[in-house]
Image: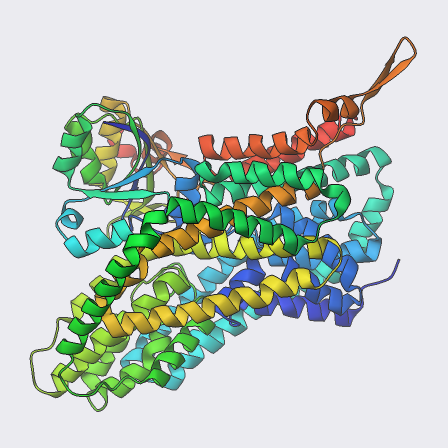
Amino acid sequence: MWDIVFARVDDRLIHGQIMTRWLKGFPAKTVIIINDLLAIDDYMKSIYTMAAPPGVKVKVMSINEFVEESSKPGEEKAFILFKDIESVEKVIDAGVNIKFLNIGGVAKMAGKKTIIQSVSLNDKEAEILKDLHKDKGVEIYFQMVPDSERLNIDYVIEKFFPKLK
Amino acid sequence: MSQITILQAVLIAGWVAIVESRIIGYTLSGFLRFTAVGTGLIVGLIMGNVPQAMIIAATIQLVYMGVIAPGGTTPAETVVATAVAVPVALVSGMDPAQSIAVAVPIGLLAAYLVSVRFFLNSLITHWVDRLADELNDKGITFASIILTTIITILLFFPSVFVAVYYGAPLIDAFLKTIPQSILHALTVVGGSLPALGIALTLAVIGRKELMPFYLLAYFSSLILKPLNVNAIIYAIIGGVAAYIYVMLYYRNAFENESTIQENEISDITKKSNNTEDLGDRKVTEKDLKMTWFRWWLTTEVPHSYERLQALAFQWSIMPVLRKLYNKNTEELKEAYKRHLVFFNTQGTWGGAPILGITLSLEEQRARAISEGKEAPDPNIINATKVGLMGPLAGIGDSVEWSTIMYLLIAIALPWAKSGNAMGALFPLILFPLITYTYGYYFLKMGYGLGRESISVLLGGEKLKALITGLSTLGLFMMGVLTSNYVSVSTPLKWTISGKAFELQGILDKILPGMLPLLTVLLIYWYFTKKGLKVLKVLLWMVIIFFILGWIGLL
């Protein structure tokens, strides 16, 4: 159903950087936010859909809805956003083909290591990413906006989570 | 060659420092930080040569078209680049295209200073937390607003002063020593870089289906070049074309939607009026106006990575919070603290409605508490702010900065290129004015309608039609700018059996204006296939065009 041109993990979901720096560089007509909580919040769902600038369609789906839609035929170009790394794991495990994953925003919390300015990871998240990369062949890179520092998963594991190697 | 006086360097450095502190208003400081024309005018006044300053600033502006800073990030600080490059160019009599060689590196370096600023501001945030706990309004004002402004001024003033006062003669001397071939290469680079800015703006406005308007404008203005058509005429023609397109495309919206939307609005207003049977509202129109002014003035002043706009948000509603919670110091403290948590959005499209909605929620809470009734959960207030700030930033950044601001600049750029101060005054006055006005309207709607205001503001087709119209006009103006200000041409000529051939002449016979157009479209294609990697493209363009210019191909 989807030709995924860009996939990103950003706990702030849609915001300025997404709409102006990323989306314009991978112009797909449909932006899909994959998040279970948001999918059942009618008010916020309508906000995300309405606040889409003209020329862009925004859809909000739960993980299951997205997996289901993905198995349908079609090659609609899609730009997908996840709120967290666990959601990506679920979607890929369910069989959706994501080749490149951008990790752009994960908030800093206790027990997390700061990887780039906007992304901090704990051991569990790092392990999930490592497995997705090694076992499922997903190219994973950390970058906030196209011009900022870009690190790939191998480098990050090596430097920040050497025990996981 | 004349010298830059100490006074001039001081004034220029002071200007940059004040703009970087962002205390002069969200859209005004944003305009001045990201664009060159405003600073060009000021530097022109300081140096006593407005026309030439405007011409140089216009050239720099073309390179920096499309530069905005969502989420507090910028690839380059245009204000610093312009404030250093223009005096240097004025004093050394440099060709405007060569001034770009000075502007670009300075802009990149200045971006590092902005990171330092973020770090320094973060040192203040914890102090403000403590002041909030003490309900020390004056202290909060000092720490969040005044001290942060002073810190930024102290950060930028010395570096810009040194760059201007000592840098100018240095750069001038350096330029006098380099050979002609390198100077020519620099001119080639400078002539081509506007293609970058224009391609970026095309990508950032991002409506592929509207690109025909770009081509239409490009070739029309190419043909009409000898007639020296006034910039405003192009804007009007573009406006008419955009209007026709929008009328046709959104025809249904204008025929059907208007009645539907009007009914919706009156329904929602009736609903909100009914729920407000809890006595008269404490928040007055004056309060709303003051809140909007406070927010607009200080949105990014206390900027730090940890809280971004939070401190400004809290400071903006502080007086109203105090009024609402009155004697209840514990509740007031909680209110202060809950508005110091991380907050980031686009100042007008996100900030204004969220401020209004927040005020209405806080008022409901305060009233319920004072009447001894069950008060709405305070977590809802923050959840609403956090939920709305993202998507509203998405549309705000793409409409206000990427479309409206650059459209105004594009219309005025021909004036700037011919040395006219209107090139700066037109966008400088209109942009803050327009955004301040509709921003207040957003805030008022947010307060009056609460959460429903977002559907009213964003839900209608009319807004989408308006934005599409502006985007169309923006692309149109980019076409006009491309034909006039992107210089890519080849001096290659050769002779075959006594007959001279000029490559440029041959290209012109096939398709006039081919090289500039191809340059822009190539970069645009790259941006939309590989992403908006502005710095990477900038670097490659400088290298490629320098080499091509140096070996004489261009």
Q: Residue at x 67, y 60 (%)?
A: B423
Q: Residue at x 47, y 64 (%)?
A: B120
Outermost residue on the right side: it is: B498
Q: Position of residue B495 (x, y in %)?
A: 87, 14
Do we see residue B282 in this rendering?
A: yes
Q: Residue at x 25, y 37 (%)?
A: A126
Quadrant into which the N terminus of chain A falls = top left
Quadrant into which the C terminus of chain A falls = top left
On screen, residue B501 versus residue A149, left or right, reads right
Indicate whether B458 appears above or below A61: below
Outermost residue on the top side: it is: B497
Outermost residue on the front side: it is: B255
Indicate whether B526 appears above or below B57: above
Indicate whether B261 appears above or below B46: above
Q: Report the label total.
A: 0
- Residue placed most toward the observer, B201 or B132: B201
Do we see residue B340 in this rendering?
A: no
Outermost residue on the bottom side: it is: B327
Q: Position of residue A54 (x, y in %)?
A: 37, 47
Quarter of image, res B478: top right
On screen, residue B456 versus residue B467, left or right, reads left
Q: Position of residue B43 (x, y in %)?
A: 71, 64
- Image color mode: rainbow
Quarter of image, res B179: top right
- Residue placed most toward the observer, B113 or B393: B393
Indicate whether B198 appears above or below B266: above
Q: Position of residue A98 (x, y in %)?
A: 27, 28
Q: Residue at x 27, y 59 (%)?
A: B388
